[in-house]
Image: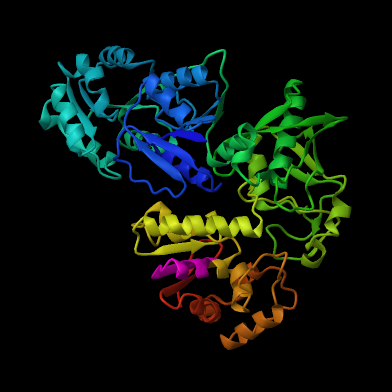
Amino acid sequence: MILVFGGTTEGRMAAKVLEESGATYCYSTRSDTQDIQLVHGHHVTGAMEVPEMIAFCQEHDIRLIVDAAHPFAVNLHRNVVDLAGQIGVPIIRYDRIYPPHDEEFVWCKDYDDAIYQLKTHGVNRLLALTGVNTISRLQAYWQDHECWFRILKRDESQALAQKAGFPSDHLVYYEKDDTASLMNQLHPQAIITKESGTSGGFEEKVHAARQAGIKVFVVERPEYPTADDITVEHVNGPHGLRRMVERLLPEFYPLHSGLTTGTCATAAAIAATRRLTTGEMPDQVPVVLPDGETIFVPVSYGDGYASVYKQSGDDPDVTNGIEIRASVKPSDYFEILGGEGVGRFTVPGFDFPPGEPAINKAPRQMLRDNIKENVSITISVPQGAEIARRTFNPRLGIEGGISIIGVSGIVKPFSEEAFVASIRKCMQVAKASGSDRVVINSGGKSERFVKAQYTDLPQQAFVEYGNYIGETLAIANELDIKNVTMGVMLGKAVKLAAGNLDTHSRHVTMDKDFVMSMLNEAGINIDISDLTLARELWDRIPAAKLQDFATVVIKHCTQYCAPLLPKGMLTVLLIDDNGKIYYS
């Protein structure tokens, strides 16, 4: 079993990742103030010292620890390392994503150094955004300087401030997005904050200070403790966490994840660039994924190139095991070229015009984000031309090889049965959250757009259906969920409108004759004989007729979906590539 130390945003994400397995695990927090819904996890509350931790782990057969606690929870981190050493299990430290150090800020090693720096810089009016637990740590400053502390409006927090002797009239209470207004109201000379990472609101705080022309003091995050006799693996995102759990405790997940061709190409290019610029040839390289997290990918080397052998995990994929190569040359500008085995677009409608290598927008952006040097990168796949014949590429108008694709950078390993089981678990969590509406989406992109329409719903109310629209709605009906919103993008929508409740490209492709019939129904007369991808329609249909077309598509989608939710109300939202949402 796995034990998670949570109570943070990262803890919530860790729980979500572990829920995908269907296996039981334990989620530990100091108090019960964090509202988290678990299906397979057991929520344990109450602070534990090392002896209690050891007894707990022995009782529950803990074989892996995920430390997702706050970066400044120094004592807990030490106890976790001590615990792991005594019971002989590895630790995965789920850390935050941290922006690079900005030289404009005053960086403080600890709170004593912060007091010294504040006094040295002559700061007499300070807004402290470091939290209620740091009031006593900064007492030597606020005793003889004007200082405000922003804290949570909780009885527990107010009691701690009172115990520290801090004047109540200089307490301000946290409200969402209030940092800039506080600065305008209080006119401090400086703010002090912790290096709390992206999820801790660090960037929002310093941005507000910059806008107000206020100096920023930052208390650096403590280093994570280590010990010679234990394994500590660091991750900073959900994909990395899952991959690390799969490696350290392989039996926890029935199916294992893999990497997209885009991630493999990026890793190979990073390795080839490092070899060119520094002469180094590491056996693995860090790759920043589109969500900002970093994973490490094994690489190998040949004569003039670096390569990655693609591992698709347990997802059925014809590209599993193929070698993806990258060769790099010096250049006056950054460019990406397609070599042997990489297909080329031959028709319009893709991210790039005909003649360009079939390397999609997301992988190109990954390459640019990960490689800062101006180099010429050639991606090649020696087996690509042969493998492409077993894909839909020739039918789509991609010739000569495979596509380099991938939106998230990770291949989630779901057989149909496992995927549907995962959807069921997520729907159960959504219902348990108490939300009066569940919003189902095909993936992270559509979810991001629809979330802007339902800002009051909890995270658990958003569920990904992938391609299994029919199965998801049937589960919603079984669970007696009364209100369901379905976000769908056009590629899936035109398949769904034709009655295909499973929209996976392995099973169904776009029916242009049916699309033409919907255009006619909407009173739109355009030629789509050369249509390659459904999303091209957004550009081809006159702007004045887009709503008419969307209404027709939504009507047909609803015709097939609503009967699956006879006890509830279904709302279908059609989303374009820029996030605009169409209602019926």
Q: Position of residue 108 (x, y in %)?
A: 37, 17
- Depth check: 163 or 294 in front? 163
* Residue 489 sits above or below residue 170 on the image: below
Color scheme of the displayed model? rainbow
The image quarter in which residue 386 lies: bottom right
The image quarter in which residue 348 lies: bottom right
Camera sees residue 459: yes
| Left or right of residue 4: residue 577 | right
Examine the structure image and report whether residue 23 is included in the region drawn in magenta.
no
- Callout count: 0
* Residue 38 sits above or below residue 237 on the image: below
- Depth check: 295 or 3 in front? 3
**Residue for point 56% across, 67% down:** 471
Q: Position of residue 459 (x, y in %)?
A: 41, 52
- Residue furthest out toward the front: 59
Camera sees residue 189: no
Q: Which residues are magenta?
A: 472-487
* Residue 85 sits above or below residue 183 on the image: above
Q: Position of residue 532 (x, y in %)?
A: 72, 69
Q: Position of residue 467 (x, y in %)?
A: 61, 64
| Left or right of residue 175: residue 433 | right
